[in-house]
Amino acid sequence: MPKSWEQVLGGYATNTLTEEEKRHLFEAALNDQALFEALADEEGLKAMLADPEARQRILASLQKQPIPEASVSSQGSWWSWFRQPSHLAWAGSLATLALAVVFGWQFEKEWGPLVKEQQEFEMTTSKDDEASPSPEPLLEETDRIKVPERFASQSEPVGLPPMRAEAPQSKKPTAAKEDLDRLRQVPAKVLSDSVVKKEATKARKLKEKRRVAPAPKRAFVQETPKEEQFMAPSVAMAPEPQGSFQPASEVAAFDEEVERAAGPSAPRPQDLFYAQTDRRGDEVQETVGGMRGQALLGRVSPEQQGVSPEGILGGMINRDTLHDFSVEGARGIRYRVVRETATEADGERSQVVERKKADRLVLEVNIPGYLYVLVSLGNGKWQQLVPISFGQVGKAEMGMTVLPHQPVEFSLAQLSQGDQKASASRLTVLLSPTPVVELSRWIGTEQDRPELEAFVSERVGDAIYVVDRSPKPTEPFHVEILVRK
Amino acid sequence: MVELTREDILRQLRERIVAFATSRGSREGAEDLAQDVLMVLHEKYSHVTELTELVPLSFQILRYKMLDRHRKTFRRGEYNQESVDDQPIVDPRDDPSVQAEQKERVAQFIATLQQLGERCRELFRLKLEGNSFPEIQQILGERSINTIYTWDSRCRKQLLALMGGRWEMIPLVDENKPGKKETVG
């Protein structure tokens, strides 16, 4: 029951009072003049609400959005929503967030690979820095390793130029870093090819790291730039005839160990590569015309004095002569991959790492001998690469006789020609003082690496020097070169 | 509670009507107004004896009588003396002015309703949909019916105040003072 029957007056006009409420209300109205007058006044509202049309209009208005300010059109509500500062702030925040997401995605898409490449490069550099011992531990490490006698007995190699290994690591300008800086300067749209190259380089590095064999305990390799343009060479000793191959290790595999073990007085492979010729060149007084290496360095043995170039190139190098050469000095090869590009303004050759149509492998040796470049085709098949220009190089059976510092170029297009493509872009380079009879046993021996004590390598610019410092090598000089596809 | 007879109800109604009409006009006009209402109840609605029917019926007759007196006074020219020739021919249909006033009142009422709070509008909507107070209590989930009564009373007073204190404007004219214009409410 209501405290006052006046409270139920609101139900009189709408005619929604119950019978009990009506009875009590009217009885109270008969005794209460104020209530009676209130009921009489309610009669006007009751009459208005009794009209069905008016009642429907009022009911429809109540079923709309209740707030008078909001009782506008939908278009007006949109505008009123935007007019409120808080809503504008929310809309602005959402728009900013959306723009940030879009730009971030674009940035990651365009620059993500480069940033990752740089991070990986920095991580590798820092790791190398950590792995590189300070000068004092280096000396201790050097003391522990077994140094060949001819190097252990002297602080400086005989006849070698002053050492260049003291360059601090922070100052070494790596080719990859320069490439990275150069790539950052080009517009993003033209970076796509470069990004692909970088990604390929990254994948190759990771693959190389996984394939790294345990580092040899003894090696002499000077500090070399870490960044490379193509795979580091694989150097292996000749397998034993019985098939018990000695384990080989890639030169790049023991770079860290080599750097750690290399002391300030260790000779550089590049120096060793040219020292062989320098030493021999000192013994002769004449040059052989038409041959760049001999013309520059005079690398002719005493036995070859007086022999015409044609005689030398015509396969007249006897086995003893070659053998004598290999015995007395560090034998080595220098190789690089060259590509010609027509975009160079000066017309000079631009050397890049990719193997494409015009890629060529340029080999150079520091001793005369028989040179073989083999590529495995899989399933035990193999192929010998044919040099591009063979005019100045003698040919002996399936190999070719080469002279010191005589560049020999091979087209890498041979790797993808014919029906049988090379299963892997791994080239096997053999440099032997005598003709190699059984070449097949040198194919696929890169998995077994010997503990190389005398094999050292260095990467200078785009060229790689691999030197075998064995005192008396009896087997062919065997180098595996990985060429990126 | 003692059941009131029809005579008791009519007697009390007369007193209330006279008092009500007196407050809106003159004493003489109020008695005449009450007499007219009772005459209608006696002649046309003699069969209505229930309190719940008789009282609202009397309110309805009272309103009509007040409006009729207002129209008669207007026709007599007591508000504004006009020539008979100027008066238009009587239209058998509803007075257009009445219809216009009705529409205007409805529009004003709707606008006033929009100024109420959400709860008041919801209450009025539920009432217009025919729900009684107990039903509204259930719909709104309130435990006490007095809460609904209190809410509705406050909303009614607020709505009435927004309407100017009266649901409709009925001018009353003291018949003894021709030409005097009074306004009920």
Image (spheres, rainbow, N blue to C red):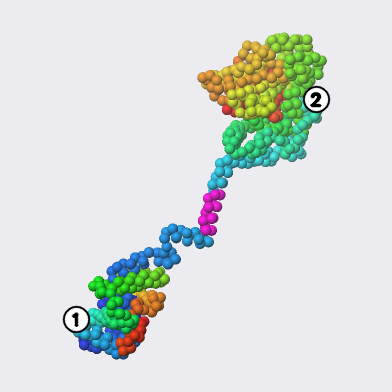
Q: Chain of mark 1?
A: B
Read off the residue under disc 1: B44
| Viewer can see residue A330 | yes
Q: Amino acid at mark 1?
A: Lys
Question: Quadrant where the C terminus of chain A lies?
Answer: top right
Q: Is residue A210 magenta?
A: no
Principal SS element in the magenta part? Answer: helix
Secondary structure, mark 2, is: loop
Residue A59, picture quadrant: bottom left
Name the spot of residue A167 as percent of width and height, x first: 76, 35
Q: Is residue A430 left or right of residue A327?
A: left
Name the spot of residue B182 as percent of width and height, x first: 35, 84
| Viewer can see residue A247 | no
Read off the residue under disc 2: A158
Q: Is residue B111 left or right of residue A434?
A: left
Q: Is residue B156 above or below residue A310?
A: below
Name the spot of residue B109 as percent of width and height, x first: 36, 72
Q: Is residue A297 left or right of residue A383?
A: right
Residue at 33% across, 67% down = A57
Q: Which residues are magenta?
A: A88-100
Residue at 70% across, 30% down = A461
- The dot on residue A191 is none
Q: Say if mark 1 contacts mark 2, CB within 8 Å.
A: no
Q: Nearer the viewer, residue A75 or A466?
A: A75
